[in-house]
């Protein structure tokens, strides 16, 4: 249904033309001025219509929506869906009025209609994009979708929408069917594949990431290759944004999550415990058997008393049964200072309320190296928070380092400049005494 009746259009154009013709201008200039006047009048009318719709209708709708308890309608306003709808009304009026304005210039009608039609297509594309953004924001309010890469799907939909809009614009400009454009597009598919390579890879990767549940928004991931170590804050079609712990943002190509390896700490976050895996290097020359007096002294440590009694009884029973000669320390079985120290660490950490004993728990020796004998603590703290985890681990190592001397052990450390200087001084003094 046309906005203006054809008879009314003719009467309006004829009246305006006759009024201007009274000035005595030529027919061409009269026709030109008539088109200019009607264009200005149309622009004023469109502005008034758009203004009234925005200020009156949109305001009333907004007031009504604010009283509503649903979140979806609020998002419609926030994403300007109604505003794009309102913009379509003046465009429809303008398109219907074009034949009237340029009645004296038939060649201009087609050009003006094309411009209005292209504007309508772009506005409708923006409208669809705003609607899809609204649904994206609405889904984000749902707990089951908060960690899903919704942005990736939105970008794919936007690509499709604007691709269709581009085909329609091409059809409007050329006057050809959209099918003809698609046929010609097939010949250029290789070029398009090259141009949109990253987009296609990102789209496929985002689907794989979502289906396989590899990464979610909020996951803590570590990807050394890209310098990423932090929480995922956004998953898009082409990139994944990671906020590192120093508040910097690292951008990773989405397809890199499929093609490269990375570490996801979601399992640790779900389990509620964070792994402690750190070693303490013992100076190997300080490792030895314990004497009876030293064992009695160490029995005063409450965490070791029961273990020492059981172990001593077990060792004595074994040595007696094998007729072991106790005069040689290499014969039979004996308690070592490093063995008791390892057991003390195990008992101390096992009784700590900050350690998860229901998860993997071990204190073990590693392969001796030029830096001594490593005693590794492999266990889980009862927190996933980084600062609390560091405090727990520091408290444990503060304690076990402080008590190491009770077991007549030494911690390995490389000689410092002061140590070297003391050795040099000792050698110098020895040399002087020898010469004397």
Image: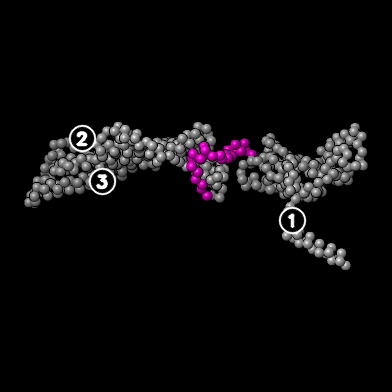
First in sequence, mark 1 or 2: give its number.
Answer: 2
Q: Tell me if residue 169 is in the magenta stretch.
A: no
Residue 161, horizontal then vertical, whole percent: 36, 36
Q: Decide: few, some or many residues near mark 3? Use Cα within 10 Å; few <14, some 14-19, many ≥20.
A: few
In space, the residues marked 1 and 2 are separated at their CA atoms by 95 Å
Circle 2 sits on which residue? 2
Horizontal and vertical percent position of residue 417? 73, 60
Q: Which sits earlier in the primary sequence, circle 3 or circle 1? A: 3
Along the polypeptide, which appears first: circle 3 or circle 2? 2
Distance from the alpha carbon under mark 3 to that under mark 2: 20 Å
- Residue drawn at x 41%, y 40% is 194
Residue 266 shown in magenta: yes
In this rendered view, identify the residue nearer to me: 362 or 6: 362
User: What residue sits 53% from the left and 35% below the top?
Assistant: 214
Query: What residue sits right under mark 3 in the picture?
Result: 47
Left or right, 365 with respect to 26, comes to: right
Q: Over which residues does the magenta segment extend?
A: 248-273
User: Residue 400: percent from the left, percent from the top?
Assistant: 75, 47
Q: Which mark is residue 172?
A: none
Report which residue position mark 1 lands on: 415
* Callout 2 secondary element: loop
């Amino acid at each position: 249904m046309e906005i203006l009746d054809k008879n009314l259009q003719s009467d309006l154009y004829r009246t305006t033309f006759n009024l201007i013709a009274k000035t005595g201008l030529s027919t061409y200039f009269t026709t030109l001025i008539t088109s200019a006047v009607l264009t200005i009048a149309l622009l004023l009318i469109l502005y008034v219509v758009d203004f009234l719709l925005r200020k009156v209708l949109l305001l009333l709708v907004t007031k009504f929506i604010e009283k509503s308890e649903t979140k979806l309608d609020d998002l419609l306003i926030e994403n300007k869906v109604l505003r794009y709808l309102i913009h379509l009304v003046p465009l429809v009026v303008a398109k219907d009025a074009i034949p009237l304005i340029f009645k004296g210039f038939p060649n201009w009608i087609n050009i003006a209609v094309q411009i209005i039609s292209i504007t309508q297509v772009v506005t409708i594309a923006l409208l669809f994009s705003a609607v899809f953004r609204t649904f994206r924001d609405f889904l984000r309010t749902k707990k089951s979708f908060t960690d899903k890469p919704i942005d990736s799907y939105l970008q794919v939909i936007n690509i499709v929408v604007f691709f269709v809009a581009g085909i329609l614009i091409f059809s409007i400009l050329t006057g050809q069917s959209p099918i003809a454009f698609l046929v010609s597009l097939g010949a250029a598919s290789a070029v398009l594949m090259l141009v949109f390579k990253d987009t296609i890879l990102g789209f496929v990767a985002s689907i794989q990431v979502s289906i396989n549940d590899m990464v979610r928004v909020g996951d803590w991931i570590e990807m050394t290759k890209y310098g990423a170590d932090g929480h995922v804050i956004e998953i898009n079609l082409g990139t994944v944004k990671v906020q590192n712990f120093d508040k910097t943002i690292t951008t990773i190509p989405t397809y890199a999550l499929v093609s490269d390896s990375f570490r996801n700490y979601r399992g640790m976050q779900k389990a509620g415990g964070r792994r402690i895996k750190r070693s303490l290097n013992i100076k190997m020359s300080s490792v030895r058997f314990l004497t009876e007096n030293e064992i009695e002294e160490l029995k005063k440590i409450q965490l070791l008393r029961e273990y020492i009694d059981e172990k001593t009884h077990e060792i004595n029973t074994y040595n007696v049964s094998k007729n072991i000669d106790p005069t040689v320390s290499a014969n039979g079985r004996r308690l070592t200072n490093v063995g008791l120290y390892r057991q003390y660490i195990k008992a101390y950490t096992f009784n700590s309320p900050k350690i998860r004993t229901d998860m993997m728990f071990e204190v073990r020796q590693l392969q001796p190296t030029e830096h001594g004998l490593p005693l590794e603590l492999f266990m889980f703290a009862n927190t996933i928070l980084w600062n609390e985890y560091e405090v727990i681990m520091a408290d444990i190592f503060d304690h076990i380092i402080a008590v190491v001397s009770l077991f007549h052990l030494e911690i390995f450390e490389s000689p410092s400049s002061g140590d070297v200087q003391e050795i040099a001084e000792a050698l110098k003094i020895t040399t002087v005494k020898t010469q004397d």
